[in-house]
């Protein structure tokens, strides 16, 4: 199931990126700042969690903002890393010890981290969809059922 959720997460992020790019071209207007902020946050978070799983220091901060092209690159890179972790890490029950931005230290299984990352993306994609609607833009339908139907 984690592999399917990973594939869904990558599909939904790609669809959202394409929709935002098309909206910017079609309306010749900038994408709402809050959409970029949340999309950047999704990309950063995926990078931070993959770094934690690999035991390396994240090179991104949680709310660091990027342009659409950088988000696309980061999401592709981290999406592939997440897929590799899901497919190849035979120790998904392994506990990862990490420090969050406040300095607090936690320990979480890779299974729970992966589920969190995929759920986190869904949560923020919904916020982006609402922001797009509020700004007169047509959001992407990134519902899981759309993914399994395609």
Image (cartoon, grey):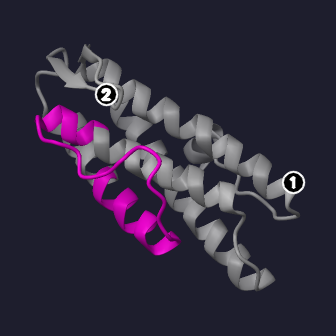
Q: Secondary structure at mark 2?
A: loop
Residue at position x 56%, y 64% from top? Answer: 17
Question: Within 10 Å of the Cα at label 1, are there few (<14), some (14-19), or many (20+) other Cα atoms?
Answer: few
Residue closest to the eye, 35 or 14: 35
Q: Nearest the camera: 40 or 13?
A: 40
Q: Find disc 1 in the rendering and name its residue.
A: 134
Q: Residue at x 41, y 33 (%)?
A: 117
Does 68 sit above or below residue 25?
Answer: above
The residue under the point 80% across, 81% down is 27
Residue 72: percent from left, percent from top: 43, 66
Residue 4, magenta (yes or no): no
Secondary structure of residue under mark 1: helix
Counting from the top left corner in percent of width and height, residue 35 is at 65, 56
Magenta span: 49-78
Residues 148 and 42: in front is: 42
Vertical side of 27 occupied by 131: above or below: above
Q: Which mark is residue 85?
A: none
| For residue 144, above or below residue 72 | above
- Residue on which disc 2 sits: 100
62 in the magenta segment = yes
Q: Decide which of 112, 146 is in the foreground and name it.
A: 112
């Amino acid at each position: 199931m984690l592999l399917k959720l990973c594939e869904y997460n990558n599909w939904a992020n790609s669809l959202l990126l394409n929709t935002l790019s098309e909206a910017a071209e079609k309306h010749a207007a900038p994408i709402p700042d809050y959409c970029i902020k949340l999309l950047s946050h999704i990309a950063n978070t995926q990078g931070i969690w993959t770094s934690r799983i690999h035991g390396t220091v994240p090179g991104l901060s949680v709310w660091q903002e990027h342009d659409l092209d950088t988000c696309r690159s980061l999401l592709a890179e981290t999406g592939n890393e997440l897929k590799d972790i899901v497919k190849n890490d035979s120790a998904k029950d392994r506990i990862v010890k990490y420090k969050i931005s406040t300095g607090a230290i936690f320990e979480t299984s890779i299974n729970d981290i992966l589920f969190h990352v995929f759920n986190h993306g869904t949560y923020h994609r919904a916020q982006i969809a609402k922001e797009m609607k509020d700004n007169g833009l047509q959001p992407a339908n990134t519902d899981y059922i759309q993914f399994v139907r395609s």
